[in-house]
Amino acid sequence: MADACNKWQEFHKTMPLQNMGRTWVEIDSAALIANVSVARNAADQAAVMAVVKADAYGHGIKEVTSQLHRHVEAFGVATLTEALTVRQAVGKKQMIMILGALLAEEHEAALLSGLHVTVSSISEARQYSELATALDCSCQIHLVVDTGMGRLGLLEKEFSEAATQIATMPNLTISGFATHFPSADEDQELTKFQIDQFRTLSKRTELSPQWIHLANSAGILGFGKAGGNMVRPGLMLYGIPPVTDSPHARQLHPTLEWKARITQVRNLPEGSGISYGQTFITPQKMKVATIAAGYGDGYPRNLSGTGTEVIIGNRRCPLLGRVTMDMLMADVSDLEVTPAPGDNVTLIGGQNNPITVAELADKSNLIPWEILTGISPRVSRVMVNNEA
């Protein structure tokens, strides 16, 4: 029994306990770094706040930040937990901004961790000021103006007066002015109006914060730095352009490949039902591979019956039947060499005829953001071309 326990301990040290090699994503760190450069060039060399919320869009927040911290000026996250994870990964000096509003009970941890926070009202600023005074520390805030997003920020009519008042509060430093574009990928006129409004409102305050940031990925590709001196690339950082009619969009490199392994290959007779509901019945004898990934890993169930394919042996093979929680089935009848259990399957990515995130999003009636952020924590993240 002791020998068995010792063997398990040694095994545990060397083998990751996520899906143990059944399904994983490979993250290309060189592509990540190249995409930062594309964003910076598109924004006329503005500073870059890399948006790494939602586990770095499914890429692994620790892995991504450890690769990018020397290549960006700041990181943007959505929650306190994400911010503290990044702080642990990159150290004390890097600017980390929480892009959403914090709960009152989260304020103290944010201040003590040196995080930059968003402020959307005078009362919120006062809470931070009073707490920072009590803790004898400073608080770096970014005032958000709501120019049309409707979820955070001071209203346009109150921004200038509120900013002037907040600037006098003790232990607060207004480090930034910010807004967000709701339709930079769809409505250029609205986005131009937002940029003009933001400039006008900022000038009225007669304040000069260190950072002015407006542009998300679509904003960067359509409007450069949009009048700011910092930009916030999210989706484009991961090699997926939210708009395609920009020369910079064509320079982006996909950063993620999702792979899984075959667990079984079976010869099924004509008339065999496949998966729940038997929505697919084999029309003739078929070779069917079972693949170790499913909607429990984040592979969308509504890709079922849509003509979706996976790559096996450098060939596209159609999925059969419904996607299940832990398994997919694919037709491998036409492959010249029959695959074997343990062989790799590409779910996203590939070389010559890659399966793209946009393709899966279109077929599943989702958006690329959902495909990426839906990849489950039980899928291992593996960094390739690792700089660290």
Image (cartoon, rainbow, N blue to C red):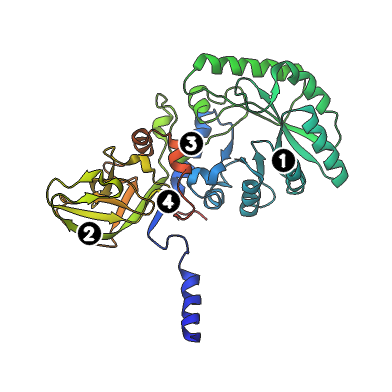
- Label drawn at residue 296: 4
Give yes or no for contact between labels 2 and 4 (Cβ–Cβ under 8 Å).
no
Question: In terms of secondary structure, where does tag 3 sit?
Answer: helix
Q: Amino acid at mark 4?
A: Gly
Q: Nearer the viewer, residue 28 or 296?
A: 296
Dot 4 or dot 1, earlier in sequence:
1
Dot 2 or dot 4, earlier in sequence:
2
Give yes or no for contact between labels 2 and 3 (Cβ–Cβ under 8 Å).
no
The residue pinned by badge 1 equals 103
Q: Position of residue 139 (x, y in %)?
A: 78, 40
The residue pinned by badge 2 equals 265
Q: Position of residue 279 (x, y in %)?
A: 25, 43
Dot 4 or dot 3, earlier in sequence:
3
- Label drawn at residue 235: 3
Q: Amino acid at mark 2?
A: Val
Q: Amino acid at mark 1?
A: Leu
116 with respect to 18 (left or right) = right
Mark in front: 2 vs 3:
2
Question: In terms of secondary structure, where does tag 1 sit?
Answer: loop
Question: In terms of secondary structure, where does tag 2 sit?
Answer: strand
Disc 4 and disc 1: Cα gap in Å?
30 Å
Q: Position of residue 31 (x, y in %)?
A: 44, 44
Residue appearing at x 51%, y 33% in the figure: 39
- Label drawn at residue 220: none
Disc 1 and disc 3: Cα gap in Å?
26 Å
Quadrant in which residue 110 is drawn: top right
